[in-house]
Image (spheres, rainbow, N blue to C red):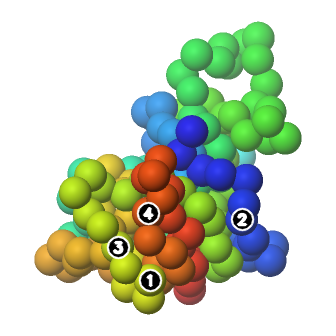
């Protein structure tokens, strides 16, 4: 599990993006993979250009929000329907991203020990770090240090 239920996002979420075609764990920060034009909120990823995912290199990436669902390739497109209540979607489905609020996540790179008040930056593979990689955007602030399980509370402010 990468996201604890202790969270608040005051209904500032974004549901206009499609997840990439890879499975992913919830709790990381998504960045733009393909940017859309105009409203760009179509019905499927085939005609859609707003695609997000966990990027390998955060340099110059536009951060979009914290992923609230687990993306699993085990779901069949013909048998299974996305269960937004359970927090599971398939690759290429619309995803829910927290843009403002706080989450408790363990998507913090190993070896990084944030302090209370440290800035939180997008890091590689959807991680959130207190160390800024060259050109990586700030996504919020650490509200706590990591606990024994590696979780920290992060205040998110992506506008």
Q: Earlier in the sequence, mark 4 or mark 2?
A: 2
Q: Work out whether residue 31 can be spotted.
A: no
Circles 3 and 1, Cβ within 8 Å, touching? The answer is yes
Q: Residues within 10 Å of mark 3 (few under 14, many from 20)?
A: many
Which element type, helix, strand or loop, lies under badge 4?
loop
- Rendered position, 46 above or below 64: above
Indicate the quadrant containing the N terminus: top left, top right, bottom left or bottom right.
Answer: top right
Marks 4 and 2 sit apart, C-alpha to C-alpha, by 16 Å
Residue at which label 3 appears: 114
Q: If the image is split into quadrants, where does the C terminus sit?
A: bottom right
Image-based side of 108 in relation to 40, left or right: left
Asked whether the residues under the numbered discs 2 and 3 touch, taking CB atoms below 8 Å apart as contact, a structural biologist would say no
User: Dots 4 and 3: beta carbons under 8 Å?
Assistant: yes
How far across and how far down the image is residue 149, in percent? 47, 48
> Which residue position is annotated with label 2?
7
Give the residue drawn at x 76%, y 31%: 82
Residue extending furthest front?
Answer: 148
Compared across the picture, whether 125 is left or right of 14 comes to left
Residue located at (79% from left, 25% from top): 81
Q: Which mark is residue 146?
A: 4
Q: Earlier in the sequence, mark 2 or mark 3?
A: 2
Residue at x-position 37% and y-position 79%: 115
**Could you tell me how far apart the alpha carbons at marks 2 and 3 are, in whole angstroms?**
19 Å
Q: Is residue 84 visible?
A: yes
Which residue does the numbered mark 1 point to in the structure image?
116
Q: Is residue 135 above or below residue 58?
A: below
Could you tell which of marks 2 and 1 lies nearer the N-terminus? 2
Density class for disc 2 (Cα within 10 Å; few <14, some 14-19, many ≥20) is: some
Q: Residue 80 falls in which quadrant of the image?
A: top right
> Depth-wise, is mark 2 or mark 1 nearer the camera?
1
Seen from the viewer's position, the closer of residues 51 and 148 is 148
């Amino acid at each position: 599990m990468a996201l604890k239920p202790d969270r608040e996002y005051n209904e500032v979420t974004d549901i206009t993006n499609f997840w990439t075609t890879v499975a992913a764990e919830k709790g990381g920060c998504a960045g733009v993979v393909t940017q859309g034009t105009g409203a760009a909120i179509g019905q499927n990823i085939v005609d859609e250009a707003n695609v997000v995912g966990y990027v390998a290199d955060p340099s110059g990436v536009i951060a979009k929000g914290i992923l609230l669902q687990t993306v699993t390739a085990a779901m069949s497109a013909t048998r299974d329907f996305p269960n937004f209540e359970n927090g599971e979607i398939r690759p290429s489905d619309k995803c829910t991203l927290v843009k403002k609020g706080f989450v408790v996540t363990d998507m913090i790179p190993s070896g990084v020990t944030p302090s209370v008040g440290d800035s939180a930056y997008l890091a590689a593979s959807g991680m959130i770090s207190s160390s800024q990689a060259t050109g990586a955007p700030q996504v919020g602030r650490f509200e706590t240090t990591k606990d024994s399980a590696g979780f920290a509370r992060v205040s998110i402010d992506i506008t």
